[in-house]
């Protein structure tokens, strides 16, 4: 039997942390679908075509090198507006969602497009300022040379591109539970997510 948890929301809202912890808690598999777009985005920075890269993408590529850089995030959000690129990544995501033992997928369109029948849908948000601060601390800890202002500008630019595109725009599914983490600690946000999911198990 499969049980799918769809977790969507904008960059640095806490999706990744919550998804990982939820998967560990229930023993579910976890797929960060942003990595698929990041891997394709990285290929375009290397000079490859986005569609070819999406069609040739392998699971191994998601593990190779650091995909969580500001440059790759931007390239990812650019390839993510292309409908054919999105279409090429659907089967991989749906197959992952259907695996037995439960799965958590996080992204932008999991509850709306990839897994419209997911048992649980969360839409995790936080103010752009709080998200930019979290992302700034994360990137600085890795030694990246970034400023708060630059990270906030990048976050806002990416939000706009993700929300305004016509192919699978970022938006909460009608039946998603919204979780605003602006004033919540990681522990509190996770407790809330676990409570919502446990109620559906
Ligand atoms: O979640 P993450 O920041 O790693 O995603 C990088 C980019 O990939 C997003 O800004 C978005 O443009 C795209 N993406 C998407 N659909 C998903 C996951 C990510 O369009 N399900």
Image (tube, rainbow, N blue to C red):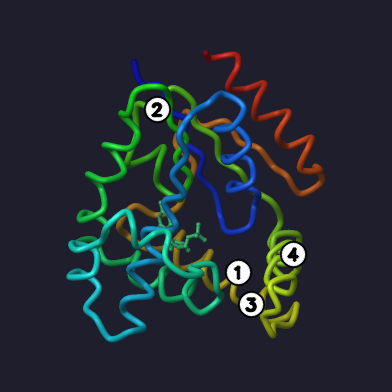
Q: On the image, which quarter does residue 77 sit in?
A: bottom left
Q: Measured from the top left, where is residue 193 in percent x and y? A: 65, 30
**Residue 129 got which mark?**
4
Q: Is residue 137 left or right of residue 63?
A: right
Q: Is mark 3 within 8 Å of ligand 1?
A: no
Q: CA distance from mark 2 to mark 1?
A: 27 Å
N-terminal of the pair, mark 3 or mark 4, is 4
Q: Is residue 104 above or below residue 53?
A: above
Query: Which quadrant: the N terminus?
Result: top left
Mark in the foreground, 2 or 3: 2
Circles 3 and 4: CB atoms closer than 8 Å: no
Q: CA distance from mark 3 to mark 4?
A: 10 Å
On residue 118, the disc is 2
Q: Which mark is residue 153?
A: 3
159 sits to left or right of 135: left
Give the answer, above or below, for where 174 lies relative to 113: above
Instruction: Say which residue appears at 52% left-offset and 13% top-offset.
Output: 201
**Residue 118 coordinates in the image, percent (x, y):** 40, 27
10 Å crowding of disc 2: few (<14), some (14-19), many (20+): many
Q: Nearer the viewer, residue 79 or 66?
A: 66
Mark 3, secondary structure of its residue: helix
Kindly report the distance in space between the C-alpha atoms of the residues bearing marks 2 and 4: 30 Å
- Sequence-first tag of 2 and 1: 2
Position in image of residue 98 (x %, y %): 30, 29
Residue 180 screen position, x and y as percent: 69, 42
Q: Which residue is mark 1?
A: 155
Secondary structure category for the residue under label 2? loop
Give the CA separation, mark 1 to mark 3: 6 Å
């Amino acid at each position: 039997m499969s049980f799918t948890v769809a977790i969507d929301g904008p960059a640095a809202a806490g999706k990744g942390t919550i998804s990982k912890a939820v998967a560990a808690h229930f023993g579910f598999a976890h797929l960060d679908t942003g990595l698929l777009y990041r891997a394709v985005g990285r290929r375009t920075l290397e000079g490859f075509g986005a569609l070819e890269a999406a069609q040739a993408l392998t699971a191994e590529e998601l593990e190779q090198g650091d995909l969580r850089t500001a440059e790759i995030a931007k390239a990812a959000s650019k390839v993510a507006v292309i409908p054919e690129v999105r279409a090429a990544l659907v089967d991989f995501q749906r197959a992952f969602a259907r695996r037995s033992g439960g799965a958590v997928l996080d992204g932008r369109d999991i509850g709306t497009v990839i897994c419209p029948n997911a048992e649980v849908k969360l839409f995790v948000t936080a103010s752009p300022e709080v998200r930019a601060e979290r992302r700034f601390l994360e990137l600085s800890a890795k030694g990246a040379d970034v400023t708060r202002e630059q990270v906030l500008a990048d976050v806002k630019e990416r939000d706009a591109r993700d929300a305004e595109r016509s192919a699978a725009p970022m938006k909460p599914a009608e039946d998603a539970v919204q979780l605003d983490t602006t004033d919540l600690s990681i522990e509190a946000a996770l407790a809330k997510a676990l409570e919502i999911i446990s109620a559906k198990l």
